[in-house]
Image (cartoon, rainbow, N blue to C red):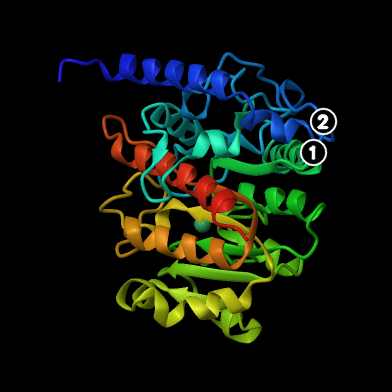
Amino acid sequence: MGTVPGRRRTAGRREAKEQKGSVGGAARTTSARGRRRRLGPDNGEVAGPYVTFLGLPPDLNPPDSARAAILPLPYDLTTSYQPGARRGPLAILEASTHLELYDEELGVETWEAVGVATLPPVVPDTRGPAWALARIEQAAREIVQAGTLLASLGGEHSVTAPLVRAVRSRHPEVGVLQLDAHADLRDTFEGSPDNHACVMRRLLDAGVPLAQVGVRSLTGEEMELIRRRGIATVFAREAVGQPVEAWIGRVVAALPEEVYITVDLDALDPAIMPATGTPEPGGLDWYRTLEILRRVAEAKRIVGFDVVELAPLPGLVAPDFLAAKLVYKLLAYTFLLNR
Ligand SMILES: [Mn+2]
C-alpha cells in the first residue's frame, strides 16, 4: 500500500477534527446541559502526556463535555500466575489509535456520537492493595457523580469492586454482568479479600445482583455458592456450545434495569486472547462475545463497564487490538442501542 499506518491514522484524526468543526454541534449538546463538573488531572497523579483512546486530541473530546470517560487502571498487585496486567491499559490505548473510527455494524462514527475523553491513569504505589483500590474508587466516584459513563481499562480484575461501589453511589440498584473464565467468588485468596479471585464475592456480599457468562474454572465451594444463592451462571460449555438464544433469557432475567458490565478478557478463547494472567482453554469467540453484549445492551441500560486482565505479550499485538476494539464496541452498544 505504501502508507505508513501511524501517519494514516494521524491524518484520519485530523480529518475527523475538521469535519467536526464544520458540523459544530455534536459535542456541544452534552456540554449544554451545564451540569458537568470538570474532570481531569485531579483524578490521578499523572497529568500527562499520555496516549488517548483512539488517539483523539484531548481538545476534540474535552473531559467536561464527553459522555464517556476512559479511566486507565494499571494495577496488578495480586496477580497469581502471569503478571503484567499493569501494562494492559497502555497497550489498549496504543492499539486503539489504530482502530477504524467507523462502526460497520451500526453505521456510525461512535466517537463523534458519544464523546470520549481519556483521563489520566490512577497509578498505584507501594502502599498496597487496600490503598490502591480506595484511590480507584475515589477517582471513579468523581466521574460517576459528574454523570459521565465510566469505562475503565484494567489492570487485574480486583479493580471492579471499587468501580462498582462508585457506580452504586449514583445507581444503587445496579446489577453486574460478568464475562469471565473464573467465578471469582472466593471469600479470600492468598491471604487477601481484595484478591482478583474474590472480586465478585465482594459484590455478592454487598447485595449486587450478578450474572456470569463463560465460567469454566472454579472451586467446589464456589459451585456450591452459585447453587445456594441461585446466581445466574452460564458456564462456557453452554455459552459456547448452545446458541445465545437458548440461555440469554436467564442472564437478562437475573439483571435489573441498570447494568454494569465487567469483561475479564480470559472469558474469551485463549486462541484469540492469550494475553491474560490465567488463560483457560475453551471460551467465547469474538462474534459470540459481541452478540452477548449487544443483547444485554438492547434489553438493559448500561451504566458503566470495564475491560480487565489484559497482560500484553511482547510482539503479539492482536490481543491488545481485540481489547481496544471491544472497548469501542461497548461504547457503541452502551450509547447507540439503549432504549
Ligand atoms: Mn476474573
Q: Assign a secondary structure to mark 2.
A: loop
For mark 1, what is the residue? 146
From the viewer's perspective, tell me whether residue 255 is left or right of residue 336: right
Q: In the rendered image of this protein, does residue 56 appear above or below residue 310?
A: above
Q: Quadrant of the C terminus?
A: bottom right
* Snapshot quadrant of residue 261: bottom right
Mark 1 to mark 2: distance in Å? 6 Å
In the drawing, does residue 19 fall left or right of residue 322?
right
Q: In the rendered image, which quarter contains the N terminus?
A: top left
x then y, percent, for residue 27: 65, 29
The answer to whether residue 196 shows anywhere in this view is yes
Query: Is there CB contact under 8 Å for labels 1 and 2?
Result: yes
Few, some or many C-alpha atoms within 10 Å of disc 2 (few <14, some 14-19, many ≥20)? some
In the image shown, does 20 or 110 lie closer to the viewer?
20
Question: Which sits in the foreground, 134 or 192?
Answer: 134
User: Which residue ends up furthest to the right in the rendered image?
Assistant: 35
Q: Earlier in the sequence, mark 1 or mark 2?
A: 2
Residue 318 image position (x, y, % from top left):
29, 39
Which amino acid lies under the numbered mark 1 shown in the image of this protein?
Answer: Ala
The spot of residue 16 in percent (x, y) is 46, 22
Name the residue tied to disc 2: 37
Residue at x-position 48% and y-position 39%: 85
Determine if the C-beta at disc 2 is less than 8 A from ligand 1: no
Label 1, secondary structure: give it: loop
